[in-house]
Amino acid sequence: MPVATVGDAAEASLRVTESTIDEFAALSGDENPIHLDESYAAETTFGGRVAHGMIAASVLSAAVAKLPGDIVYRAQDLSFERPVRPGDEVRATAEVVEELSGDRLRAETTARVDEAAVVTGGATVLSLPHGDGAADVQ
């Protein structure tokens, strides 16, 4: 029986700065100039520098991790709706919408800047009581 249940929800947020983007590029190795070079990015469809989509997706992960229980990701689907720019605050929500087999749950996830969705999707997770063998999950 999972610890989290249908209707449980959690939130997380992150202010994205130029430093956030630079540090993510260094960590991930994704040095696409659309993220790092303002003059290059200004000539693209975005009209300026944008954050890596996975930065906003990581805020979804932070929200999912705040659901009750020891949360173990099993799957994630994402749709990138619009860009995130330096200075934006990404606010993410995760809500458990369905119990699946075993201790698996399905959560709907949305990351927003202001009221506009920037990343949407869903996650399949395990929600286990602490110390219930999560390290043994395959």
Image (cartoon, grey):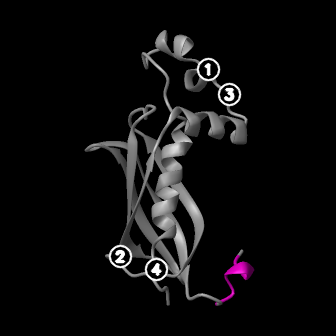
Q: Quadrant of residue 8?
A: bottom left
Image coords of residue 55 (percent x, y): 54, 44
Residue type at mark 3: give it.
Glu
Q: Residues under labels 3 and 1: Cα distance?
A: 6 Å
| Circle 4: element type | loop
The answer to whether the residue labelled 2 contacts the one labelled 4, judged by CB atoms less than 8 Å apart, is yes
Is residue 128 shown left or right of residue 68? right
Residue type at mark 2: give it.
Asp
Q: Which residue is mark 4?
A: 68
Q: Residues under labels 1 and 4: Cα distance?
A: 39 Å
Residue type at mark 4: give it.
Pro
Q: Residue at x 48, y 45 (%)?
A: 56
Q: Nearer the viewer, mark 3 or mark 2?
A: 3
The quadrant in which the C terminus is found is bottom right
The answer to whether the residue labelled 3 contacts the one labelled 1, judged by CB atoms less than 8 Å apart, is yes
Q: Which residue is mark 2?
A: 8
Q: Which residue is mark 3?
A: 31
| Circle 1: element type | helix
Location of residue 81 with respect to 57 vertically, above or below: above
Q: Residues under labels 3 and 2: Cα distance?
A: 37 Å
Image coords of residue 57 (percent x, y): 50, 49
Location of residue 17 with respect to 102 vertically, above or below: above
Please tell me which residue lies in front, 75 or 9. 9
Image coords of residue 48 (percent x, y): 45, 18
Q: Which residue is mark 1?
A: 33
The answer to whether the residue labelled 1 contacts the one labelled 4, judged by CB atoms less than 8 Å apart, is no
